[in-house]
Image: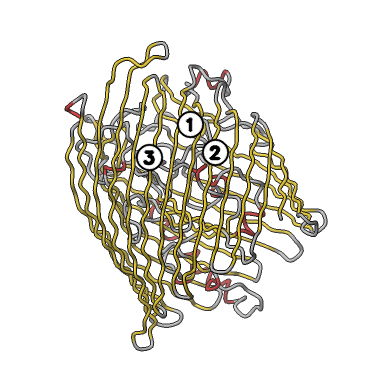
């Protein structure tokens, strides 16, 4: 019955929105959705033509937030997106859940300026994403025919700013609790036919729990040469190296005694990630050809009682052609795409005695090849009514050779067709209705390297959504959306150890609602609110004779609420306050281990002296002001819990100098 109530609520909200907007439709100064250009669909379009509840975070939105140290902090108030706060105790965690999907390191595709930044096996590392000069962030929370595998939970595209000046630069430093320090520099400019951008940062920090640390260094660069007015060649490069140590998980007794303790030895890790990509773009009138070649070389070592070492590389060529033409009075844009991927992952494990490697327990070589072809058509039937449809065909082959244990030898192959259909309708300049059906899949090649993946079928999803967005007045933007996600062969971890394999859970289903309001007044007051309600349950899942139908999926909060309020004064500076509420959730599939709801408060102050030469900005920000002691992430069962605490109160202050 709850599901039908949610669907009815969506209909009521859409109807009420239309009624409210009718009273404001003629108000001058309202911002139209068609001014928001996005590129997440691999061809430029506007929000009002996008048949999904896309979230676009602009640089002016980022400026209103308390100062952020990673991309995760910029994304936490996106409706429908759940990011557990440091679920392994340090900031390198890239765990995401979109619309009730399992919180995972491999369920979301990250892009920077359209270049894929996931590791070859799909893993995401948020500290690798440049955040010091962002123009906008585009967040899609549903599977996409344009992106296919690795994007079953959606995608996030970070677009860095392009300066029209010959040279702009800024440097900054910040310091805070847990011995945190960070240094960064950015250069950005356009000179003649050249565009260049580089973001360099490095930081050091101890963790909330004892004997934990994280020391990443990161550089991203983009260099573009505009060959002529119709063509350009771009180089994208990324290097990240880091060292750190994760804490051990806590049981309930240890958590109640002292959540900041580390009950065992810290688990150390070290990594080195490198990416190089070339992108060629050529326009033929309104049409455009894009050719990309992405290469990756990645190495990771970590110790979890066993010594793990992962060495992988990937080559990923892709070609797209966007054709824009008219069909009678209808404007039509068609995107054709072809992709290939060759990925190799070597996984080795050793027992360790007194810090010395002893017996090699695993040595597997996983090789996977895949290709995909897709087509997406966006047809403007009228200026107000747009239909989008298309599909994607994926095929993959995977060979895993067990060099120590022959049982780890696996050969797998499969194919998938993922259709999509959507539509948008602008009632007027201030009301935009949208709805769509999307589908996607994820191949077993994206299983983390330590997990054995024999007999694991691809995960598939069918996604449905409908909603309304627009502006109530010149200062209030809104969106409401209802969604339903149905997963087949959902991946479920069979245990809490990193070496425990995955299994398919039959069917799971998530139904929910997203709401967002964004207010900005001329007197300097601003606020935004986002709310998510989601029911994520097993539908058909039996394991070892136990039926889990109707049980809630672990680690997914039923409700989330985020609030940001602030005031900007030209002379006094900008003050902002945040509140993030995370509702109750279960940590196990038996639904016997439950986590309490909690609310984290934060605040930030920033003052810029733009009239100075060089310009100066000073800031201070605080998170978890009330020092909440709650569990952010967990697994296990009653009496044998494996819990991760919320990061404790932290205050950071710093300066930025711009030239």
* Residue 319 position in % (x across, y down): 33, 63
Q: Nearer the viewer, mark 2 or mark 3?
A: 2
Q: In this view, does 524 lie above or below 534?
A: below
Q: Nearer the viewer, mark 1 or mark 2?
A: 2
Q: Is residue 155 visible?
A: yes
Cα separation, mark 2 vs mark 3, equals 36 Å
Q: Residue at point 71% right, 42% down?
A: 654
Circle 3 is placed at which residue position? 553
Disc 3 on helix, strand or loop? loop
* Residue 615 position in % (x across, y down): 76, 54
Q: Can residue 516 be seen in this view?
A: no
In the rendered view, does 371 fall on the left or right side of 658? left
* Residue 115 position in % (x across, y down): 43, 55
Q: Earlier in the sequence, mark 1 or mark 2?
A: 1
Cα separation, mark 1 vs mark 2, equals 19 Å
Q: Residues within 10 Å of mark 3 (few under 14, many from 20)?
A: many
Q: Which of marks 2 and 3 is nearer the N terminus?
A: 2
């Amino acid at each position: 019955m709850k599901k039908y109530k949610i669907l009815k609520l969506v209909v009521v909200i859409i109807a009420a929105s239309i009624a409210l907007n009718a009273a404001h439709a003629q108000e001058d100064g309202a911002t139209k959705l068609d001014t928001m250009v996005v590129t997440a669909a691999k061809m430029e379009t506007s929000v009002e033509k996008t048949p999904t509840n896309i979230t676009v975070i602009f640089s002016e939105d980022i400026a209103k937030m308390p100062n952020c140290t990673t991309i995760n902090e910029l994304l936490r108030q996106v409706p429908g997106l759940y990011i557990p706060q440091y679920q392994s105790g340090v900031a390198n965690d890239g765990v995401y859940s979109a619309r009730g999907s399992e919180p995972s390191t491999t369920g979301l595709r990250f892009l920077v300026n359209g270049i894929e930044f996931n590791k070859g096996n799909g893993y995401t590392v948020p500290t690798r994403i440049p955040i010091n000069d962002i123009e906008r962030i585009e967040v899609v929370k549903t599977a996409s025919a344009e992106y296919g595998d690795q994007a079953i939970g959606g995608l996030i595209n970070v677009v860095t700013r392009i300066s029209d000046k010959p040279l702009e630069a800024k440097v900054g430093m910040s310091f805070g609790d847990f011995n945190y320090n960070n240094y960064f520099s950015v250069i950005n400019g356009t000179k003649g036919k050249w565009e260049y951008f580089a973001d360099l940062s490095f930081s050091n920090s101890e963790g909330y729990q004892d004997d934990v640390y994280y020391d990443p260094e990161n550089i991203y660069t983009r260099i573009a040469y505009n060959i002529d007015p119709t063509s350009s060649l771009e180089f994208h490069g990324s290097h990240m190296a880091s060292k750190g140590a994760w804490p051990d998980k806590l049981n309930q007794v240890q958590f109640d005694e002292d959540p900041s303790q580390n009950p065992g030895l810290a688990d150390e890790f070290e990594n080195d990630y490198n990416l190089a990509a070339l992108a060629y773009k050529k326009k033929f009138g309104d049409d455009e050809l894009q050719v990309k070649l992405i290469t990756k070389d990645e190495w990771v070592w970590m110790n979890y009682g066993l010594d793990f070492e992962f060495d992988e590389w990937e080559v990923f060529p892709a070609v797209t052609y966007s054709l824009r033409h008219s069909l009678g009075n209808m404007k039509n844009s068609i995107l054709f795409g072809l992709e290939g991927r060759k990925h190799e992952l070597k996984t080795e494990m050793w027992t360790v005695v007194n810090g010395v490697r002893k017996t090699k327990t695993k040595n597997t070589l996983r090789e996977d090849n895949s290709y995909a072809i897709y087509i997406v058509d966006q047809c403007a039937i009228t200026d107000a009514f747009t239909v989008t449809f298309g599909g994607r065909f994926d095929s993959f082959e995977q060979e895993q050779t067990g060099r120590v244990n022959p049982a780890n030898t696996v050969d797998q192959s499969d194919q998938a067709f993922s259709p999509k259909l959507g539509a948008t309708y602008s009632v007027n300049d201030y009301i935009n209705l949208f709805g769509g059906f999307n589908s996607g899949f994820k191949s077993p090649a994206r299983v983390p390297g330590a997990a054995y993946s024999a007999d694991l079928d691809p995960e598939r999803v069918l996604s449905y959504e409908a909603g309304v967005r627009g502006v109530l007045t010149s200062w209030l933007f809104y969106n409401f959306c209802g969604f339903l996600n149905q997963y087949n062969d959902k991946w479920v971890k069979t245990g809490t150890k990193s070496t425990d394999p995955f299994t398919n859970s039959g069917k799971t289903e998530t139904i929910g609602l997203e709401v967002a309001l964004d207010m900005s007044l001329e007197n300097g007051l601003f606020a935004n609110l986002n709310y998510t309600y989601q029911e994520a349950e097993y539908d058909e899942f039996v394991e070892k004779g136990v039926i889990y139908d109707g049980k809630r999926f672990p680690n997914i909060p039923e409700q989330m609420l985020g609030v940001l309020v602030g005031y900007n004064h030209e002379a006094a500076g900008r003050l902002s306050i945040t509140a993030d509420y995370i509702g109750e959730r279960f940590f196990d599939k038996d639904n016997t281990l439950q986590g309490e709801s909690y609310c984290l408060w934060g605040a930030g102050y920033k003052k810029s002296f733009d009239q100075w030469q060089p310009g100066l900005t000073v800031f201070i920000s605080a998170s978890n002001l009330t020092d909440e002691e709650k569990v952010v992430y967990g697994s296990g069962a009653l009496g044998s819990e494996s819990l991760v605490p919320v990061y404790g109160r932290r205050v950071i202050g710093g300066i930025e100098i711009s030239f």
